Amino acid sequence: MMSTPSIAVLGAGANGASIGADLIDAGLDPVLIEQWPAHVDAMRRDGLRIEMPSGTRHVHPRTLHLCEVATLRETFDLVLLVTKAYDARWAATLIAPYLAQDGAIAAVQNGMTTQTVADVVGADRCVGTVIEISSTMTDPGVVHRHVDPERSWFAVDATARRGHDVADVLSHSGEVARVDDIASAKWMKLVSNASVLVPTAALGLPMVDAIQVPGMRELMLEAGREALRVAGDHRVLPIFGLTPTSIAASPDVVVTMLDALYERFTVPGATTTVLQDWRKGRHSEVDDINGTVVAAGRRLGIPTPVNEAIVAVGHAIERGEVEPSLDALALMRGGGAA
């Protein structure tokens, strides 16, 4: 790893703040840049508190409001972009002038954002990344991280120029897989996300509770199977710590991944980022996840009725026409799930 890299975490919400705290605890000095003013103010006033199963981590990070980025005089070797997927383009554009000439932005996000960031800063200054951390933030300055770093997981593009540097940095926050096909790894995460994030949020329930609702597991699996069917050139790769052998031996990769997700990363009471957004009255990543599956299906001429129904329900919730509830299951099943 490069010696003492200068690091920015752009998007210091629940996951970004968790990563930032891990880096500080490891002796690094990241700058946390965030668009929620109250959160930045709270971190400056009281520090950042991360509540984890193993205990509480309390750190005092350097912080910036978005509007203060224009005052920067330093440049960054690495920028960890931990915003929502739909914010990737403008966020990369915002920080690009402060990226060192030989620096890189790691797109530590859901969705297929690697190319979006590469379009802004160039492919040689972008590192594709997969993230699996479970955390929630309701009050500014306080994150509830549902799993310790030992139960968090990343995949990083080992072929990227700064890939191993990013992997070294993220290893302070979780297990890191260094992969040679990040696009396929990200698509496999998309398969998982399509199964879980919006569908469980639509029921208004934590993930553990949602999958126990009769008929829900079947719908979740079919959403993931559709995503796998429209994967195109993307390969089936092991994620979440699975092995090539376990994937090759699996009669149903979507079942194997869903079970791995729930066994290793999902804890009682934890909700998806989508439900957290909806409870705050915010737009979610439905178009970046299930909407990406639908778009791929249309390009390839492969029907994706379940994901289409999930997108429709997500949009209806965001328009305020329906509320997340058990009634949403019938609406999502209207897409033709088995």
Image: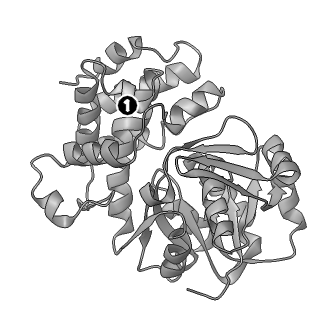
201 lies left or right of 30: left
Most foreground residue, 54 or 26: 54
Does residue 296 appear anywhere in the picture? no
331 lies left or right of 137: left
Q: Secondary structure at mark 1?
A: helix
> Horizontal and vertical percent for residue 280?
66, 28
> Horizontal and vertical percent for residue 103?
64, 80
Q: How is the image coloured?
A: one colour
- Residue in the image at 58% along x and 27% along y: 278
Above or below — where is 189 with respect to 248?
A: above
- Residue in the image at 55% along x and 72% along y: 126
Above or below — where is 199 with respect to 263?
A: above
> Horizontal and vertical percent for residue 237?
26, 62
> Horizontal and vertical percent for residue 193?
39, 43
Q: In which quadrant will I find the C terminus?
A: top left
Q: Amino acid at mark 1?
A: Val
Above or below — where is 269 with respect to 24?
A: above
58 lies left or right of 71: left
* Quadrant position of residue 82: bottom right
- Of all residues, the one furthest to the bottom in this rendering is 3
- Residue in the image at 28% along x and 43% along y: 258
- Residue in the image at 48% along x and 31% along y: 269
Provide the residue designation for mark 1: 208
Q: In which quadrant will I find the N terminus?
A: bottom right
Most foreground residue, 318 or 51: 51
Does residue 104 appear anywhere in the picture? yes
For the residue carrying disc 1, how many other residues have a C-alpha within 10 Å: few (<14), some (14-19), or many (20+)? some
